[in-house]
Amino acid sequence: MIDEIALACKESNQQVPETIGETMQCIYNSLSLDYRNTLKTLESLTGKVYTSLNIVGGGSQDTYLNQRTADAAGINVIKFKYLATCIGSGLTGLAGIFCVMEFKSGAWSTTDISSIKAFGWLAVALVIFAMWKPLNLIWGSLVFGIFYWAYQYLLKISTDLTQMLPYIVTIVVLIIVSFRNKKENQGPASLGMSYFREDR
């Protein structure tokens, strides 16, 4: 197969791959462009514009191929990655300000760092508990908020246990999610991975 790829590149006046990495690059380019051409053909035949493309088979689990296919189809992958990062960071900042204004009465000092960290752990547990789905996140945050209010004001739990609870909840959530080890419950496969368009 490697020899056939090299021959095809030579016949089409393209750079002939010399390493395994360059050969894989050719394969990824070919697959992503084939997906794009198939999508454009479907759009021309049906007269419809398709906003999603479902890749089946082994390729559906290849995050890099999925990003390259989206890029080849005209979706600005880098823009959406930065946009998601900006929105997430903005919401995180708003949550931090709300925490300081609501729970700390607008005053914050270095002695409050441990309590802020506790809320951070709850946020991590909530995202995992929601299985990375925004709608689940909304309902989950309401449930977590009710539990926080209940154990603090109704149950009158000791201060030590109150401080430990966010960490306990995080551990419990991680254990529960590990038992529900399904593909649809996993986080985004490209999370934390950079995408460089120049690599195409």
Image (tube, grey):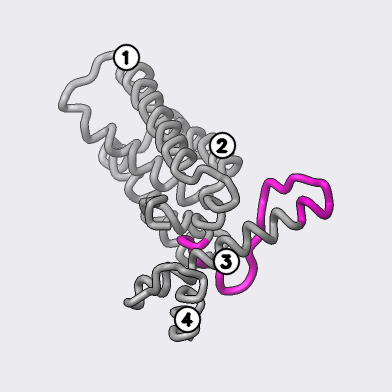
Disc 4, SS: helix
Quarter residue 104 falls in: top left
**Residue that protrudes farthest toward the top in the picture:** 106
Identify the mark nearer the N-term, 1 or 2.
Answer: 1
Q: What residue type is labelled 1?
A: Ser
Disc 3, SS: helix
CA separation, marks 4 and 3? 28 Å
Q: Name the residue under label 4.
A: 7
Q: Mark 2 points at which residue?
A: 138
Q: In front: mark 2 or mark 3?
A: 3
Identify the mark nearer the N-term, 3 or 1.
Answer: 3
Quarter residue 99 falls in: top left
Front residue of 176 and 76? 76
Q: Is residue 124 above or below residue 91?
A: below
**Residue that protrudes farthest toward the left in the picture:** 110
Q: Name the residue under label 3.
A: 60
CA separation, marks 1 and 2? 25 Å
Q: Mark 1 points at which residue?
A: 105
Tell me the crowding category of disc 3: few under 14, some 14 to 19, or many 20 or more residues within 10 angstroms, Cα based.
Answer: few
Q: In front: mark 4 or mark 1?
A: 4
Question: Which residue lies at the image location 50% right of the left edge and 55% below the top edge?
Answer: 67
Q: In this view, does 125 lie to the left or right of 54?
A: left
Tell me the crowding category of disc 4: few under 14, some 14 to 19, or many 20 or more residues within 10 angstroms, Cα based.
Answer: some
Q: In front: mark 4 or mark 3?
A: 4
Question: Which residue lies at the image location 56% right of the left edge and 45% below the top edge?
Answer: 75
CA separation, marks 4 and 1? 71 Å
Q: In this view, does 135 lie to the left or right of 144?
A: right
Q: In this view, does 115 lie above or below 5?
A: above
